[in-house]
Every structure is written in structure tokens, then in C-alpha cells.
Image (cartoon, rainbow, N blue to C red):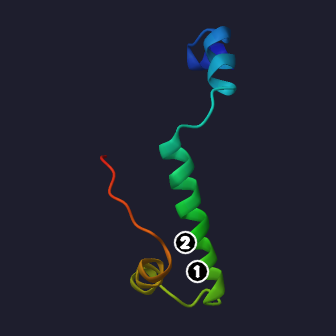
Amino acid sequence: MCEVLNVSSSCFYRWLVWPESPREQRSKALVDKIQQVHSDSKYIYGSPRITAELHKKVKWYQEAT
């Protein structure tokens, strides 16, 4: 696989065990909360209502992109 990706095996294995950044952890937590709100609504809510529910339930923070 490393040959196909044109990377060394040492770089690949270093990437494989690299810990998630805090930003990636926050993003995954937000996805989990979105999925929870969506399933709680029995998959009826669309993005506007999910956003409104999240604003009620989740502490929001601004982050640079």
C-alpha cells in the first residue's frame, strides 16, 4: 500500500499511531451530538431544526478554520 500511496512505510506507520488533535476530537464530539439529535427526532429533523436544537443544548465556541 505504501508504494501505491508513494510514501515510506515508516511515515505510514507513524501516521497510523499519531494521536488525534484536540480539534479532531471536538469535531467528532460534535458529529456525535448531531447524530444524537437526529436520532432523538426519529430522523424527522432536517439541518435547520438540528441546528436549533444544538444551539439549545451545546456550549458553542468559535474556532479558526
Image point 57% across, 55% down: which residue? Answer: 28
Q: Amino acid at mark 2?
A: Ile
- What element does badge 1 sit on? helix
Image point 63% across, 32% down: which residue? Answer: 19
- Pointer 1 residue: 37
- Pointer 2 residue: 34
Could you tell me residue 2's position as x and y percent? Answer: 65, 16
**With respect to residue 15, does 7 lie above or below?**
above
Image point 40% across, 66% down: which residue? Answer: 60
Could you tell me residue 7's position as x and y percent? Answer: 57, 13
Checking the image for residue 3, the label placed there is none
46 left or right, relative to 62: right
Tag 1–tag 2 contact (CB < 8 Å): yes
Could you tell me residue 15's position as x and y percent? Answer: 62, 23
**Looking at this view, is 61 or 12 the one in front?**
61
Image point 52% across, 45% down: which residue? Answer: 24
